[in-house]
Image (tube, rainbow, N blue to C red):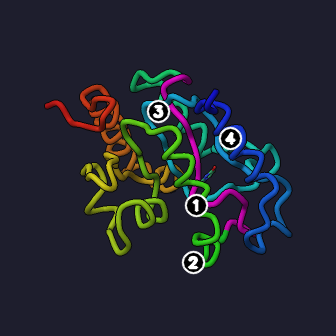
Amino acid sequence: MAEGKHELLERLAGQIRACTNCALCETRNQTVPGEGHFNARVVFVGEAPGADEDEQGRPFVGRSGQLLRQTIREVGWSENDVYIANVLKCRPPGNRDPEDLEINACRSWLIAQLVTIRPRLIVTLGRHSMALLIKPGMKITQDRGKHVRRDGFVILPTYHPSAVLRDSNKLEDFRKDLLKARRLSDVIDDNGRLNV
Ligand code: URA
């Protein structure tokens, strides 16, 4: 029988745990492949694991993760509706920005996860996932909250939750964007068509 989505995602996670595509494999404690449901309606894509994630091997488990997970619940999604991943699967030392070389070495893992899950919607968190999945050079303050179509996916960019923690003025827009994401995911059919 053909491998199902669940098995495929598990196999990918195993391959990610063994990955030595870039030098971050030398400094990581654990890889952070991602977590959530194989049939998720929405995939959230952050930047890279921080210290907590590197220790636990799970995405968004620190302070910014609490904000993200709480807002996900507030807009009415359950654990089974979402998958949470990052552009980089390993922590950059000292939480520095991801380098181009690292993003290029890691991107195929994320693409394989997205193609496997085939979510109705992708929500990019912050500029790195927005640049990778939509296009480079976009401005988060101008482009957040506006959904676009790319490669058969509907993608909605919003702030990274750690930017929201640094500036509470962003909280309202962050909530608004996730609420919009929730509504969009209800009107996108399984073929990626928007029925509005
Ligand atoms: N920030 C991210 O971008 N990803 C995480 O998993 C945690 C913090």
Mark 3 closeness class: few <14, some 14–19, many ≥20 residues within 10 Å: some
Q: Residue furthest left?
A: 196
Q: Residue at x 17, y 30 (%)?
A: 195
Name which quarter of the figure residue 89 lies in.
Answer: bottom right
**Reading the chain from its start, which is encountered first: label 2 or label 1?**
2
Disc 2 residue type (three-letter): Asp
**Reading the chain from its start, which is encountered first: label 1 or label 4?**
4
Q: Residue at x 28, y 36 (%)?
A: 180
Q: Residue furthest front?
A: 1
**Reading the chain from its start, which is encountered first: label 3 or label 4?**
4
Q: For residue 71, which numbered disc appears in the image?
A: 3
Question: Is the Cβ of the residue at disc 2 closer than 8 Å to that at disc 1?
Answer: no
| Residue in front for this viewpoint, 140 or 114 | 114
**Element marked by disc 3:** helix
Count of numbered badges drawn on the protein: 4
| Start-end of magenta stretch | 79-95
* Picture layout, residue 125 above or below residue 2: below
Per the model, the C-alpha gap separating discs 3 and 1 is 28 Å
Q: Residue at x 43, y 49 (%)?
A: 168
Q: Residue at x 72, y 42 (%)?
A: 11
Per the model, the C-alpha gap separating discs 3 and 4 is 14 Å
Asked whether 82 falls inside the magenta stretch, the response is yes
Disc 3 residue type (three-letter): Thr
Question: Is the Cβ of the residue at disc 3 closer than 8 Å to that at disc 1?
Answer: no
**Element marked by disc 4:** loop
Per the model, the C-alpha gap separating discs 4 and 2 is 25 Å
**Reading the chain from its start, which is encountered first: label 2 or label 3?**
3
Per the model, the C-alpha gap separating discs 2 and 1 is 14 Å
Q: Which residue is mark 4?
A: 61
Give the quadrant of the C terminus.
top left
Question: Is the Cβ of the residue at disc 3 closer than 8 Å to that at disc 4?
Answer: no
Q: Which residue is mark 2?
A: 100
